[in-house]
Image (cartoon, rainbow, N blue to C red):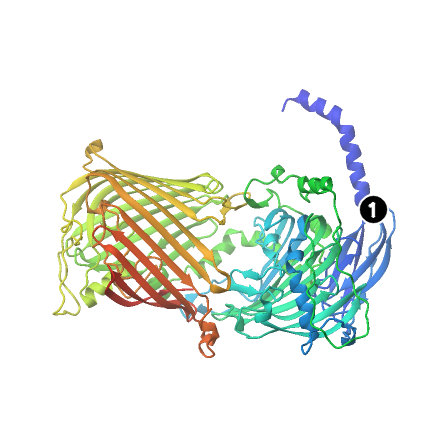
Amino acid sequence: MPTAFITVLLHKYLPAVLVWCVCLLAVEAKAGTLKGKVTDEKGQGLAFATVYLQGTTVGSTTNERGDYQLTVDPGKFTVVFQYVGYKSQTREIEVPEGENPSALVLNVQLLPDVYNLNEVRVSLSGKDPAYGIMQQVIAKRDYHLKEVQAYTAQVYVKGLQRLIDVPKRVLGLIKVPAGLKPGILYLSESVSELSFMQPNKYRERMISSKVSGNSRAFSYNQASEFNVNFYQNLLKAKGVNERGFVSPLANNAMFFYKYELVGSSQNNGHLIHRIRVIPKRKTDPVVAGYLYIVDGAWRLHSLNLYVTKDQQIEFVDTLRITQQFTPAPGNVWVLQSQKFTFDVKGYGFRGNGYFMAVYSKYRVKPAPFVKPPPAPAPVAAAPQPPQPTLSAEPTPKLSRKERRAQRNAVPATGVPEAEYFKKKEVLLIEQNANIRDSAYWAQMRPVPLTEEEVSDYHTKDSLQVIKESKPYKDSLDQENNKLTVANLLLSGYSYRNSYERNSFNIEPITRIWQYNTVEGLVANLRISYTKRFEDRRSYTIAPTLRYGFSNQRAQAKIAASYNYDLVRRRSVGLEGGRFVSQFNPEEPITPFVNTVYTLLLEENYAKLYQKGYLRLWHNRELVNGLSATFLAEFAQREMLFNTTGYVARDRASRAFTPNDPYNAEVGSTAFPRHQALTAAVSLSYRPGAEYISHPDRKINLGSKWPLFRLTYRKGFAGLLGSDVDYDFVSFGVSDDLSLGLLGTSSYSASVGTFWRKDQLYFMDFRHFSGNRTILSGDFSGFQLLPYYRYSTQRTYVEAHYSHHFNGFILNKLPLIRKLKWQEVASVNYLHTPAAGHYLELGVGLEHLFKVFRVDFYTGFQERQKVSSGLRLGYGF
């Protein structure tokens, strides 16, 4: 910037800037701090009690020891202290004017609320009065769900996870990393501005983030993920329960819950009913605990609910949620705080933790046209003396002009979304969100840290420099780089240099040593080198050496890839050499499975050919939701033949098949040596795709639309001596569907054709991922289809559908439900000119021993049964 311009800028705007700074400092100096401790009747600190200023949405929550702190502007206020199940208390305070007002200390003891049954006047004849209350609440569920059209709020989120027990090995094989020890595993805080608009649109801007022990990381806390709304019929709980949970306020809640009125109490000017929620069947996807209902308004005042492992949750013994609501301007109530606490256990690990969110600085826009429905008339009950009750919330009558003004008003933010949000961006993390000093956090943090948390921050932040040093990382690498049996057999061996951010990887023995009828015993050594950079760029180089002892051929190839832009999701790569390949480029038969079936069962399913080739590819996101892959390959291809017939156990009824697979369309698939130049473009598009923006990367999310794929592949004749000449195009669609309590479904369908096929060879056909072994690595494809019999060079239609019931059936069986097995059903369909109508139907069980799955399939062709069999694999 030129010096003259800087001079003019300072001369013109410096006085105004100085005045603004002075005003800002004056306002900052006037703010005071209110802090103290909230205890129970025994003098013990009440964890996560709510503290707020009456008539405002400014509030805080106590920490695990009952301590709180709150920034308060000068003036007189009424402070409300409340805790679920305890009698609220109010205190009058006055924050004096002054440059440096001292902190106000206010300690409060809360006593358990006394709920009196004779205050209730709503009941059903012959039933607990709670049913009459819940009938009123359920009738107004939709009204309360939609009463806020839009809002913004500042949300403080803190998450903590502890490890109590840590095994030395998982399943007795996989060694636990040396740095994983009992204690706080994760501690993080974040402050976000959350925006909401009906029907269910959230936008979040994370303005600060702090992760213990890692100043460069961003918190995983996402405020929009914490909005569990019990006014919805079904509560989604991704990662906890695949079916979700039926809300005790749902329209069909009476089928799942029993209710019991514990009593009612006057609390802060409201008559509050305490309702005990009791599941009718513990194994249903339900919750248990207490609801606190505001009489007359028939809305949630607070709740304390929990689920246990009986509700088919995985790894979590108990998950508890508490929520506290508060009145806001506009005759609506808003969520003020919520907390999730959990105990986890699995594979030798045991721990606990919590996530809490505190909402403040609300700006609310009530819905303009929502009117409460008429309350259902309760069945006549025994006469009771009249008791004070709140009237139903009135809905103000608006003129046509006022309604039009409300409809066209700017959302509650007061700032149009476009000013800092891009379309479909659900979370924006500011560039310097993780660069905040301790003074900032002392001012912004509404919940004081406990001694344990202070110690964890201090220890890990102090050790961060040490942990980033070469000697420390070398010591960890020395321990983690030790060779184990699990490395050799299962995962392969990795040698890491954490300080230099690079690693070497060698595949397990089951992939190094192979056997097939073409090459005999095979030594296949692949070593990959990966280099990562601080800005998340990375590249990988992977050479592979291969030698067949029967055909005595040495082969080699090298692959390289470079991820250079994680915001636009761009990467490039190349691969080339002289190597063997399966006719189906997706390689459905793994070397280990083929080795076992060839040596022990005399079934040589893998069919190979050889090619010398060079392949180039490039991936990128063109626009949000639309990604493209560009690929070009030049190859010299030639046939290979069986050179050995050795088997560990000879079976008289079987014999090895030739290496050229049989195909129903063309019969023999033998081909002459030839050259092929091919290119392909693949587009994938998900309309309305949402995403998260990190400063250094973009994370794509889903949308309500399915994923569409369009692929075009061409063989070029004449160029570089190429002998292939064809055009192939396919179009597909796929998606995952949530069907609530019925489970989840996934489907995919595609149609394709070769509209021009002057010259192509068998590896250019459209192949389908069949399976003839008892093992299945992918349950989303065909499980009984022969590998190459119905590969086609003509038009085809392919479809797959699977439904995971997630315990909907087995959860009702008394003994089986304790195993937490889950049922699944599948349908696979294929149509080609040679196959006709081919159909597979399958039923199975997953989550066996938490990770395994077994299915039984039956295959039909033109309505005739042609095959059946079991398939085993992973299913979690």
**Image coords of residue 697 (percent x, y):** 51, 44
Query: At x 71% / y 40%, what residue is drawn?
Result: 405
User: Residue 766, can we see it?
Assistant: yes
Depicted 67 relative to depicted 628: above or below = below
Query: Left of 493 or right of it: where is 458?
Result: right
Q: Quadrant of the N terminus?
A: top right
Q: Between 671 and 562, which is closer to the camera in this rendering?
A: 671
Quadrant holding the C terminus: bottom left
The three-letter amino acid code for the residue at tag 1 is Lys
| Secondary structure category for the residue under label 1 | helix
Left or right relative to 46: residue 594: left
Question: With respect to residue 616, does 659 lie above or below?
Answer: below
Where does the image place residue 689, in percent across and percent down from the top left?
A: 49, 45
Instruction: Name the residue nearer the viewer: 471 or 26.
Output: 26
Asked which quadrant contains residue 402, the reply is: top right
Q: Where does residue 109 sit, x and y in percent of width and height?
A: 80, 68
Q: Residues within 10 Å of mark 1 (few under 14, many from 20)?
A: some
* Residue tagged 1: 30
Rendered position, 533 above or below 296: above
Q: Position of residue 812 (x, y in %)?
A: 48, 74
Q: In this view of the protein, can residue 165 be seen by the observer?
A: no
Looking at the image, which residue sits at the far top? Answer: 4
Where is residue 111, by image quadrant? bottom right
Look at 81% across and 63% down and name the residue there: 269
